[in-house]
């Protein structure tokens, strides 16, 4: 079972980006964690990151075309702005789990709206890097 893990803008800076909010683990660390857990759950991880909205749209389509079992999506700030991502999630039948390291609801008002969340199967937020693991465990049950 193939699981796409798609990461949006600024997540390539994890580890040094606002560590008080996002922690000190890098995206590569999170990828390694997911691969290890995925192996025990019989899931293969395809980890991607882009700072460009359209790349995330393309990968959502690709997840469907490759027959992915699920997508874990941390769209970063595009979460709060992107109708294109909402439409892309609605355009595919692969279930998408919205993931955030921080809990956007405890932060600025502009982070309280999630276009991604409107179409996601569910959302896991606020547990740091563990949010990704919890999302993978949820996806294992789909
Ligand atoms: C984030 C939360 C977003 O509001 C923010 O723009 C990010 C990271 C998170 O993982 O906590 O870039 O998606």
Image: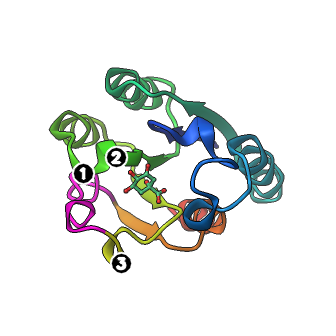
Q: CA distance from mark 3 to mark 1?
A: 14 Å
Tell me if 36 is positioned left or right of 112 in this view.
right
* Mark 1 crowdedness (10 Å alpha carbons): few <14, some 14-19, many ≥20: some
* Mark 3 crowdedness (10 Å alpha carbons): few <14, some 14-19, many ≥20: few
- Determine which residue is flagged by label 1: 80
Disc 1, disc 2: CB below 8 Å? yes
Q: Is mark 3 within 8 Å of ligand 1?
A: no
Q: Is mark 2 within 8 Å of ligand 1?
A: yes
Q: Is mark 1 within 8 Å of ligand 1?
A: yes
Above or below: residue 135 compared with residue 4: below
Which of 17 and 140 lies nearest the eye of the viewer?
17
Q: CA distance from mark 2 to mark 3?
A: 15 Å
Q: Secondary structure at mark 3?
A: helix
What is the x, y in percent for residue 128?
A: 61, 67
* Mark 2 crowdedness (10 Å alpha carbons): few <14, some 14-19, many ≥20: some
Q: Which residues are magenta?
A: 108-120
Above or below: residue 116 compared with residue 62: below
- Determine which residue is flagged by label 2: 77
């Amino acid at each position: 079972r193939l699981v796409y893990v798609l990461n949006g803008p600024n997540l390539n800076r994890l580890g040094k980006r606002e560590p008080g909010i996002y922690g000190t683990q890098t995206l590569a660390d999170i990828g390694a964690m997911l691969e290890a857990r995925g192996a025990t759950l019989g899931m293969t991880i395809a980890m991607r990151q882009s700072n460009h909205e359209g790349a995330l749209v393309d990968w959502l389509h690709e997840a469907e075309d490759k027959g992915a079992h699920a997508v874990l999506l941390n769209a970063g700030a595009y979460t709060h702005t992107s109708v294109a991502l909402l439409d892309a999630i609605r355009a595919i039948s692969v279930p998408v789990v919205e993931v955030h390291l921080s809990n956007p609801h405890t932060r600025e008002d502009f982070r309280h709206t999630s276009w991604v969340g409107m179409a996601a199967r569910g959302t896991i937020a606020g547990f740091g890097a563990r949010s990704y693991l919890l999302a993978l465990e949820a996806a294992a049950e789909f």
